[in-house]
Image: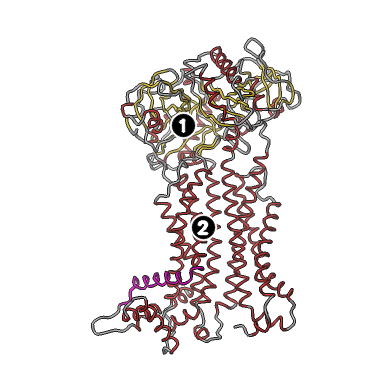
Amino acid sequence: MNIFRRLFGRKQLRGELNEEIQAHIEEKIDALVRGGMPREAAGRTARLEFGNPSLIEEDSQTVWRWSTLESFGADVRYALRAMRRNPGFTAVVILTLALGIGANVAIFSVVNAVLLQPLPYKDASRLVTIWGMNLPRGFTLDLISYQDYLDLKAQNHVFESMGASTDNMYTLTGAGEPAALIGYEFTPDYWETLGVPAYIGRTFSPDENENSKAHVAVLNYKLWATRFGCDRSVLGRSITLDGEPYTVIGVMPPSFGYPPDVQVWTPLSADSQTLKDRSVRWLRVTARMKPDVTMEQATTEVQTIAARLRDAYPKTNKDQEAKLIRLREMIAGDVRPALIVLLCSVGFVLLIACANIANLMLSRGTARQREIAVRTTLGATRSRMVRQFLTESVVFSLVGGVLGLLLAYKGAQALVAMFPPTISNLSIPRIQSIPIDGWVIAFAVVASIGTGLLFGLAPAMQSSRMNIGETLKESGRTESSGAQGRRFRNVLTVAEVALSLMLLAAAGLMIQSFLKLVQTDEGFRGDHVLTMRLFLPSSKYPDSARRLAFVRAALERIRAVPGVESAGTVTFLPLSGWWGTRTVTQAGRAVDPSGKDPRFVWDSADPGYFVAMKIPLIRGRYFNAQDNDSNEPVTILSASAAKAVFPDDDAIGKLVNVEGLDKPHRVVGIVADIYQLGVGVHQPGAEQAVKSEVYISEEQYPTFLMCLAIRTAGEPTSVSKDVQRAIWSVDSSQAISYVESMEQLMSETVALQRASMLLLAVFAGLALLLASIGIYGVISYSTSRRTREIGIRMALGAARRDVLRLVIGEGLALTLIGLVIGLAGALALTRFLKSMLFGVAANDPQTFVVVSAVLLCVGVAACLIPAVRAMRVDPMVALRYE
């Protein structure tokens, strides 16, 4: 309360106007008249500006009424004139604010687009995804069987509706060039759960369920626009998917995209055995909670039902639990922590900028002491002066915010490129464009006003507490230039150094992590490799013989393309984001009833795949032409898989059982481990399958999904058209998708880490620059105010090196205090980076030592110019300095 009274008290200094004060007013009046203002209005304006409305002349007809609005307008006009009078100071402040506010607005625009904007579904906050969980088998997120789905749907009391889905691939023919479509099969309830009606037409009806085998399809808006030209007559038209006719019944709106990148939806369908088998887990389940149900209540209910199913079906549901995740959290995925870290980091940059500008405003306040004294003597109250200073600060900040908003618009476009919408193992939602919408503009306005108040309040309070009588004297010294003013500047500088160290530590950790990431051997050579994916429709290739015939013919023609050195096929291409796992055990050994048998990524591959990808052979051999259906089933294990299955023996020549395959397979080779999902990528449900892999011969187990790896002599994409023509020469209706180089895939895998590292490095560099400017400003100002003291010291015999040590010592002390505080803060904050780091600890001592040394060197360098200037002071001149 005392502080409030001191700040806003009505006590005024009053007195007779002396000639000097009256001269100031008359000078202002003359200036306004020269600018074209009538003298009467000029006199009123001049007296109003000097803060005492009671001095405005009154006549018998009118009385000047003082209003808050009028005074605010006067404050704004005065602030604008002050900005014009000091263009250099104005440019520095506005540019600093534009960079700080613009960076914050740009990052917030990404956060807004990805995390804050409402999902395009009805009451999206009530949508949750339901997953299985089997920790003994290593599944933190598991799919759900159809029978479990029916039980969850029937036994719960917390959900309004519940739907199930599964992914699929389709080949679209008869509508231009064959196209591979990402499809999803939905139960009719799924549309009801999401609560989004069709843009045109309708979604599935209750009778188009998993038992009806209804051949109807709903298209996404982009497919409708690109393939059918937004023609509404597509409704009721038949399209061909995998050689089967499907009737188009609807098109979804442009905003609907769940799951991401899905192009066509069809009714859920499966054979009767799959629908009945509780051990076949293949469905993704989404549910809508009732309005009065909390997340905790829904989780408890689902877990209770899961426990009931474990008791009722111990053979299939042993150790099977349930887990609920909000739909927004599921969609945002791994990008959420990265965006939060970036938003906090750019916030630190703005705080450093505020500290810098506050220091500048304090120095500027010293230059305006006589003006403030005159205004106060004329009757301006302390609160009136504080309001004037805050108005000036907010005007500065709003102008900087407008410029920052323009910078943010440009920066947002650059961020779209840095955060691609689809990464091989990560999908970042709604980042195809980053709109500068009303929420972003509101954030910019609030940030600008808040920033202005933040950096303007301290200088305003400091200036309002000056000694008026001393200031009006020619040789007066003010409080703001005394010990209290210096202490406040020092506090701001220490805060800048501390915040800068925190940002530098975070950036250093991210840089180290990224370097280790890209330097890690992924187990293959990705240079000069072209990749593409094919999906063989079961209607056209129903058996192994036909699939094998296509694979052999296609590979033969691809290898004949000029520039192709080798080519091979694999089921799941590394880094593609597509993968599957199977249990592998020693033949003849009983299956572990606890479900702890190791699971590995599995692939069906041909001999050319290992050659094209240059996967090192450790022992044994690769597949060959004799590894066909007529001979013994064989397999190749990665090094870690071989060690896991045969911890005390050599795996070569041994028999293993592979889940889903009838006969034991003989191990004929051991190859290097491959980071199937990408280095540093952790996929829920595949914790044991990061590098371990089991390969099955393509000749013995051909699959519908086929990924090509083609090693070329030159640029991979230069032969892509010839390779596609070679495939179409075998089957003209075969769709080819995801045509890209392996290097591009590798780049996409680390896109999030690269973007986070680059942005943090930029923010840390900006913070370092601002901190160095802050240290320089404080030491330079302090040195200039101590010119007389330095002159006395030198006159009494102090050497130049003593002056150098004095000035640098002052800056070094501030820097060291900031380093100590910053180290403590960095140790506390960098632990939140743990999930984003690879191969480096969040408290890595090397990083902290290096960034501290860098900041210390920058601090010393920032003191050198003021120190050298102080060394050159002439003692005789300094003694006369005032």
Q: How is the image coloured?
A: secondary structure
Viewer-side residue, 684 vs 637: 637
Q: Is residue 431 left or right of residue 483?
A: left
What residue span does the magenta drawing correspond to?
65-88
Residue marked by disc 1: 285
Instruction: Give percent across and percent down for residue 503.
Output: 60, 55
Residue at x 36% of width, y 27% of height:
204
Q: Is residue 752 above or below residue 561?
A: below
Q: Position of residue 97 (x, y in %)?
A: 50, 61
- Measured as percent of width and height from the top left, residue 87 is found at 48, 68
| Element type at mark 1 | strand
Res. 182 in view: yes
Identify residue type, mark 1: Val
Circle 1 Cα neighbour tier, 10 Å, few/some/many (<14 / 14–19 / ≥20) = many
For the C terminus, give its image quadrant.
Answer: bottom right
Answer whether residue 675 is magenta in the image: no
**Residue found at the far left of this picture:** 61
In which quarter of the view is residue 267 placed? top left
Of all residues, the one furthest to the right in this rendering is 649
Callout 2–callout 1 Cβ contact below 8 Å: no
Note whether residue 688 is visible: no
Q: Which residue is mark 2?
A: 99
| Figure check: 250 above or below 451 | above
- Position of 202 with respect to 153 (left or right) is left
Whichever of labels 2 and 1 marks the residue nearer the N terminus, that label is 2
Examine the image and state in which quarter residue 604 appears: top right
Residue at mark 2 to residue at mark 1: CA–CA distance: 45 Å
Q: Amino acid at mark 2?
A: Leu
Point out residue 839 in the picture as x, y percentages from the top left corner. 67, 43
Q: Is residue 374 left or right of residue 810?
A: left
Task: Depth check: give the residue in front, 122 or 26.
Answer: 26
- 74 within the magenta span: yes
